[in-house]
Image (cartoon, rainbow, N blue to C red):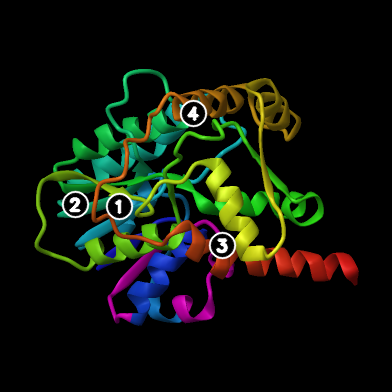
Amino acid sequence: MIVITTPTGTIGAAVAESLRAAGAPLRLIARDPSRLPETLREHADVIVGSHADPAVLTTALTDATALFVLVPPNFDAPDVTEHYLGFARPIAEAVRAHAVPRVVAVSSLGRGFDGPAGLLSAAWAMDDTLESSGAAYRSLQAAFFMENLLHQVDLISSQGMFVLTAEPDAPLAAVATTDIARTATDLLTDTTWTGHQDVPVREPVDHTPREMAQIISETLGRPVAYQQATLADYRARYASSGASPAVVDAMIEMAEAQTAGVYPPARDGALGTTFGQWCASVLAPAVADRGRAERS
């Protein structure tokens, strides 16, 4: 029995669907089961509630052989680390109580970085807590999500540009969320691994933002430029979106850590979706859809 948290989110849904297609017995923890596809509702045991709730975890983890953990974002959180630990602590206790043998969680690349890293530091605190559960543990160390650029489809489509805080010519490790889901699925269906291990999940070659702009331009067949935002601009954007002061501070710390080189360089032989492949399969269709919507 494999237990999946956040099965209605992008990554959790992909993991759940892959496991369903493989015929694995599934138990899903969902706040709103109506958001689950009918195929999952029919083929999985659905537990209604939050995976921060000890009572929900007691039900969900009975006879479980593996658990997938992803902490959902909360832009209203008064303390980002405590938001992560609010899930990690009861999960660790329940895993220990039910002797769940294996846990896989989505964390961040750069664990061991010497300095504050905002949201990344919160994810590493989660790792520490889950490792104390007694289960074998795999921390999926994800880089910058390529899908973050989908929030800028309007800007790319209408103004031919995208904006980050990263230095234009400094490599930025990135990952397609499909690779995170694939790696999680492989681990959850493998009953042989033991111990604790950080598993980097990233594209094979790191690109600078300027190189990313060139790849996007070549994929879309029109110029797209990169513009570096100041941290003040970044802070103002998140503050105006309604994020709590703690979340805004955590986003700024994460951006500062990325600029300081929190992500180690890619190793030779790394596998994964390239940025060019992602642009062709995900970004280009999204930009095309936006263009059609603007013309209609």
In the rendered image, residue 190 lying in the magenta stretch gets the answer: no
The residue beneath circle 1 is 58
Secondary structure of residue under mark 3: helix
- The three-letter code of the residue at mark 3 reads Cys
The residue beneath circle 4 is 254
Contact? badges 4 and 3 (CB < 8 Å): no
Secondary structure of residue under mark 4: helix
Along the polypeptide, which appears first: circle 4 or circle 3?
4
Magenta segment range? 22-41
Of the two numbered discs 4 and 3 in the rendering, the one whose residue sits closer to the viewer: 3
Secondary structure of residue under mark 1: helix
State left or right for residue 78 relative to residue 12.
Answer: right
State left or right for residue 165 relative to residue 187.
Answer: right
Along the polypeptide, which appears first: circle 3 or circle 1?
1
Contact? badges 2 and 1 (CB < 8 Å): yes
Along the polypeptide, which appears first: circle 2 or circle 1?
1
Q: Nearer the viewer, residue 109 or 287?
A: 287
The residue beneath circle 2 is 98
Q: Nearer the viewer, residue 83 or 48?
A: 83
Residue density around tag 4, few if under 14, some if 14–19, many if 20 or more, within 10 Å: some
Which x, y percent locates residue 109?
A: 35, 39
